[in-house]
Amino acid sequence: MSKTDIFENYQEFLKREDKDVNGVSSEFVKTNPDYEKDNRTNEGCWNCRDCRYCSSCRYCSDCRDCRYCSEQKVNKKESIKIPKIENIHQKVYASVSVKGALSMGKWHTCETTHCRAGWITHLAGEEGKKVEEFYGPCLGAQLIYRESGYQINPSRFFDDNESAMSDMKRLANAE
């Protein structure tokens, strides 16, 4: 039986000494009070709910025996096309500039509030959703950025709101 601890954020979870420990955010705990029970058979998972025997997964729900959930959420025969977003910097900056639209503490808060990576996969539409489901939000957004002509350092997905906004504005103005 694995232990599940509460972490300030995903970045802090990645720094844990025991990599078998599961992690959840305090926001996740508020909506999933049975988080310890839900993760008792998982190892090294983040914010998973109602899964069994998963390993190193993120944001899973009702999965069984999966690793990274790639085999569970996407048919292997279905090809994953990485979408390209034209003028990616201008589009993401326009989206996050709306009051309340940027929340760097969580990938997706609702349909109108996301973090930087969340906005990238959201702006990429259905293809972006498939990429995120297959690769996870961080790598998925990084691949969409790359396909759109920009090599982003994934640590930028863990900036605070002010730093992220400043960087997105800089890139939009240069595009």
Image (spheres, rainbow, N blue to C red):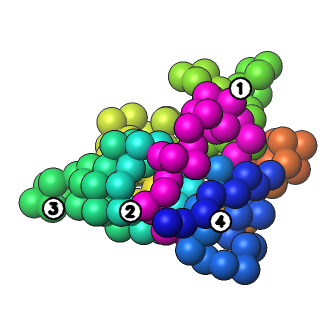
Closer to the camera in the image, 145 or 25: 25
In the picture, measured across the screen, residue 148 lies left or right of residue 170, that is left
Nearest-to-viewer mark from 3 and 4: 3
The amino acid marked with disc number 1 is Ala
Find numbered disc 4 in the image and state the secondary structure of the residue it sits on: helix
Point out the residue furthest to the bottom here: 17
Q: Which numbered dot is residue 54?
A: 2
The amino acid marked with disc number 2 is Cys
In the picture, measured across the screen, residue 165 lies left or right of residue 83, that is right
Find numbered disc 2 in the image and state the secondary structure of the residue it sits on: loop
Mark closer to the chain start, 1 or 2: 2
Find numbered disc 1 in the image and state the secondary structure of the residue it sits on: loop
Nearest-to-viewer mark from 4 and 2: 2
Q: Quadrant of residue 142?
A: bottom right
Find residue 53 and report its horizontal and vertical position in percent: 36, 62
Magenta-colored span: 25-44
Residue 86 seen: no
Few, some or many residues within 10 Å of mark 1 (<14, 14–19, 20+) = some
Closer to the camera in the image, 15 or 21: 21
Q: Which numbered dot is residue 101?
A: 1
Instruction: Read off the residue under disc 3.
Output: 76
Residue 107 seen: yes
Few, some or many residues within 10 Å of mark 3 (<14, 14–19, 20+) = few
Q: Quadrant of residue 156?
A: bottom right
Find residue 70 and report its horizontal and vertical position in percent: 30, 60
Instruction: Read off the residue under disc 4.
Output: 154
Rounded to the nearest angstrom, the CA distance separating label 1 from label 2 is 32 Å
Rounded to the nearest angstrom, the CA distance separating label 3 from label 1 is 34 Å
